[in-house]
Image (cartoon, helix red, strand yellow):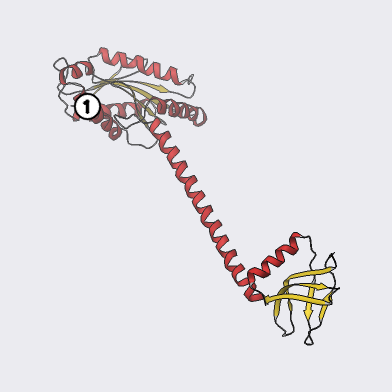
């Protein structure tokens, strides 16, 4: 009996030669019996291979490859116990399956990690690096989405423009490091005053911020504006000598976006910005709604 590797080689050679599957059984008297379908005849050789398993003269299931040479009236057969022959095959098949499974898991992991990395990169592009709140790009995307929702839901939203009072003199007097620290503290205070997950708090640029409040009418916007002014004053940041108030403060202009209005992002920001100028003209620390002279003074 030849080794498994030799048998595999013989079987492979037969396959490469285009040999059909043949069947051989060896009787107890040693006579080789060929059973149809016969293998193809090449140079007087009858060659057959069976890898499905058959009973040998010991009544054991084997797999084999055989040849019959007419001129010599001689037959050769290579057989191996079928269970033994396929034992390594099963191990190999299991190893291949495991390898494929591991490869798929690794590919899935790499895909997820790449997606998370891309999401993190995208997130960084939407975050102001100094204050760690949303930036202009984030504002543009969220404001457009919220205004579309106003049209669908028929519920108002409010856009607020905010500016730190006398911040340039503050920077000139105390330096940019303290200015940066003040910006961080005020950004954090805005997030405290505007706690809903649906609200949008962003740094518009320099000492300006923008807040967007979905599902918020003018009445509720006043409450939020009052809360913002109070939170900023409560930081008790010493202002510049040119300030009108005892602590660093903000001015707020806000515009209530009604469903029946022309809801364009730029127009909403411009209207809120016009109200902000009215608030700045009132020496700051106030909130003004667009289109009115009504002031919302900060609580003491």
Q: Residue at x 74, y 84 (%)?
A: 57
Comparing 8 with 37, the one in front is 8
Q: Residue at x 51, y 49 (%)?
A: 107
Q: From this viewpoint, which residue is outermost toward the bottom?
A: 29
Label 1: which secondary element: helix
Q: From this viewpoint, which residue is outermost toward the top?
A: 281
Horizontal side of residue 105 vs 136, given as left or right: right
- How many marks the image carries: the answer is 1
Decide: is 244 above or below 152.
Answer: above
Decide: is 214 above or below 281.
Answer: below
Q: Residue at x 59, y 69 (%)?
A: 88
Q: Position of residue 15 (x, y in %)?
A: 74, 62
Location of mark 1 (residue): 182
Quadrant location, the C terminus: top left
Q: Position of residue 227 (x, y in %)?
A: 27, 30
Q: Residue at x 33, y 31 (%)?
A: 133
Comparing 124 with 47, the one in front is 47
Comparing 136 with 102, the one in front is 102
Horizontal side of residue 284 vs 246, given as left or right: right
Disc 1 crowd rating (10 Å Cα; few below 14, some 14-19, many 20+) is many
Q: Position of residue 287 (x, y in %)?
A: 29, 21
Quadrant location, the N terminus: bottom right
| The quadrant where residue 202 appears | top left
| The quadrant where residue 86 appears | bottom right
| The quadrant where residue 19 appears | bottom right
Q: Position of residue 28 (x, y in %)?
A: 77, 87
């Amino acid at each position: 009996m030849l080794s498994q590797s030799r048998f595999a080689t013989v079987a492979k050679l037969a396959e490469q030669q285009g040999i059909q599957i043949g069947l051989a059984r060896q009787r107890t008297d040693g006579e080789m019996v060929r059973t149809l379908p016969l293998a193809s005849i090449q140079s007087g050789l009858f060659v057959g291979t069976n890898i499905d398993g058959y009973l040998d003269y010991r009544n054991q299931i084997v797999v084999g490859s055989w040849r019959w040479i007419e001129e010599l009236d001689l037959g050769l057969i290579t057989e191996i116990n079928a269970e033994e022959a396929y034992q390594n095959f099963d191990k190999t098949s299991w190893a291949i399956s495991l390898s494929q499974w591991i490869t798929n898991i690794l590919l899935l992991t790499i895909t997820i990690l790449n997606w998370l990395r891309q999401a993190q990169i995208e997130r960084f592009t939407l975050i102001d690096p100094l204050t760690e709140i949303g930036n202009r790009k984030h504002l543009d995307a969220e404001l457009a989405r919220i205004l579309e929702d106003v049209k669908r839901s028929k519920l108002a939203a409010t856009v607020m423009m905010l500016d730190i009072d006398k911040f340039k003199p503050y920077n000139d007097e105390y330096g940019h490091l303290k200015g940066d620290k003040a910006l961080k503290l005020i950004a954090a205070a805005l997030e405290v005053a505007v706690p809903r997950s649906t609200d949008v708090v962003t740094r518009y640029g320099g000492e300006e911020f923008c807040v967007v409040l979905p599902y918020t009418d003018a009445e509720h916007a006043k409450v939020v504006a009052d809360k913002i002014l109070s939170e900023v004053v409560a930081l008790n940041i010493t202002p510049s000598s040119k300030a009108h108030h005892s602590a660093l403060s903000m001015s707020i202009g806000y515009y209530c976006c009604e469903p029946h209005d022309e809801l364009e992002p730029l127009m909403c920001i411009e209207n809120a910005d016009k109200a902000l100028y009215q608030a700045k003209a009132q020496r700051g620390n106030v909130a003004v709604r667009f289109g009115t002279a009504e002031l919302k003074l900060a609580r003491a």
